[in-house]
Amino acid sequence: MNLLQPVLILSFAFLAVFGEATLSAPRHWLGAQIDLLPALMVYTALNADIVTVSLLAGLGGLWFDSVSANPLGVSILPLFAAGYPIYLRRELILHERPFAQLVLGTAASAAVPALTLLLLLNTGRQPVLGWGSLWQWVVMTAGGAGATPVIFALFDWCGGAFGYQPHTLPGFRPDREIRHGKILK
Amino acid sequence: MFKQKNYLALGAVVFVAVLLLSLPTRATERLKLAVGSWFLPLFGLAGAAQQLPGDLADSVLPRHELLLQIDALRRENQQLKEQQVQTVAIARENDQLRGLLGWQRQVAWKLKLANVVMRDPANWWLTIQIDLGSRDGLQTNQPVLTAEGLVGRVSAVGYLSSQVVLIGDPNCRVSAMVENATHDMGVLTPAGPPDASLLREPPVQLAYLASSANLKPGQDVLTSGLGGVFPKGIPIGKILDVQSLEFGTVTTAGVKLNAHLGALEQVWVLFK
């Protein structure tokens, strides 16, 4: 089993959560912080196995909630709910097309915060909500959608740079060689 | 086999999420702080990276610029010393007058400086993480402020870091009073998240005011000391506008906070 891909995905998730917690530029300029975990989940669901999808939902959600005022574990289910249907139908998705990545990134980035808020409200929490939340949701959706093709490109590059290259056979085969000239008996 | 693996993963994730959500609050807080401490090694790296441009700029600052800054700091220091002498005299006089009237003496604030290391990545909470914890004697509900005014209160304490819930979050309500003739009292509550025109600061309102409250824009809002969390007299902000709702039976006032919550880098934790 090639461990590079899960390790890269989980490392990226860890750094993404750290970046979201420390870099306040998007919040300063756009009024909302962009969440990269849904976009990463789209990549994982299309390119990795179910164990990595589950690990990303579990650990990514846990890391996110640990630096947030969210109740611990509340982000796990929305992340998994975004990745699991994509994973189940990934043979039908043209995941190499940037447009498909953009559409899936938009859907996941819109669904994850909405589901998290739904869970929070159902557990009796009182998050800061109002008309401004709609703007924040739009920023999160657009930011996540834009980040999805970038994450695909980044991981494709990482896979090429650090992973094993696929072994390709040369076109030359000695048994199919056409020999010219007179055959001596 | 393939389907069974998917169902197993689904079941495992749901089980872990439900288990975490149903843990007792105290256990969740501890687990949260333990998981959050995984990020601590990265703080040092981030801090060093942020400090690097400053250090580079310091190394190329001309000597005459440094001398000018030293001169300005000396003057400021002199002014502050004079102000301190006056303040000590006023405090002594205040204590004597309080003694004559039989009032309780005011206790001087003890403050500890903390660096803001993280902000809440979720847009629906207003919290920050500071680099002081139980190792430094921090406890929950200690007030947090800047030189400009109140910022929030400590909501969870870890060994090395703590979470501070900021004004504007539903979990941080402050009993406040307006510095006017009638000292109108109210509770500082959030008024929704920032909208597109108000990107930087959370809108905050002074609610539960008496209908006869005589408020005007520009009046100072201070902590009232009621509730036992925040001591009396910490500046919070200024009245922005006053609204009379429900046919004049309910009065609320918009408040502009003194502290710039969007750009917090260092804060003071108040020890009683």
Image (cartoon, grey):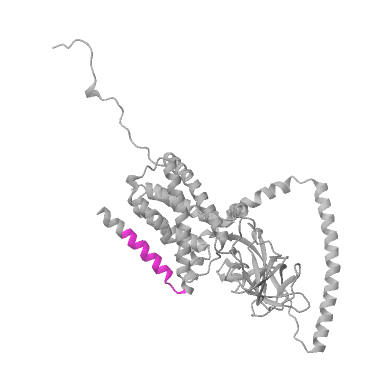
| Left or right of residue A157, residue A20 in this image | right
| Left or right of residue B204, residue A176 in this image | left
What is the x, y in percent for residue A125?
Answer: 50, 70
The residue lying toward the viewer, choosing from B78 and B210, is B210
Quarter of the image containing the C terminus of chain B?
A: bottom right
| Left or right of residue B11, residue B228 in this image | right
Task: Tell me what residue is drawn at x 34 percent, y 62 percent.
Answer: B12
Against B92, residue A185 (above or below) is above
The residue lying toward the viewer, choosing from B222 and A170, is B222
What is the x, y in percent for residue A84?
Answer: 36, 55
Report the predominant secondary structure element of the magenta stretch.
helix
Q: Magenta stretch?
A: B8-24
What is the x, y in percent for residue B233?
Answer: 73, 75
What is the x, y in percent for residue A88?
Answer: 33, 51
Task: Tell me what residue is drawn at x 36 percent, y 45 percent.
Answer: A93
The residue lying toward the viewer, choosing from A158 and B155, is B155
Would residue B13 be counted in the magenta stretch? yes
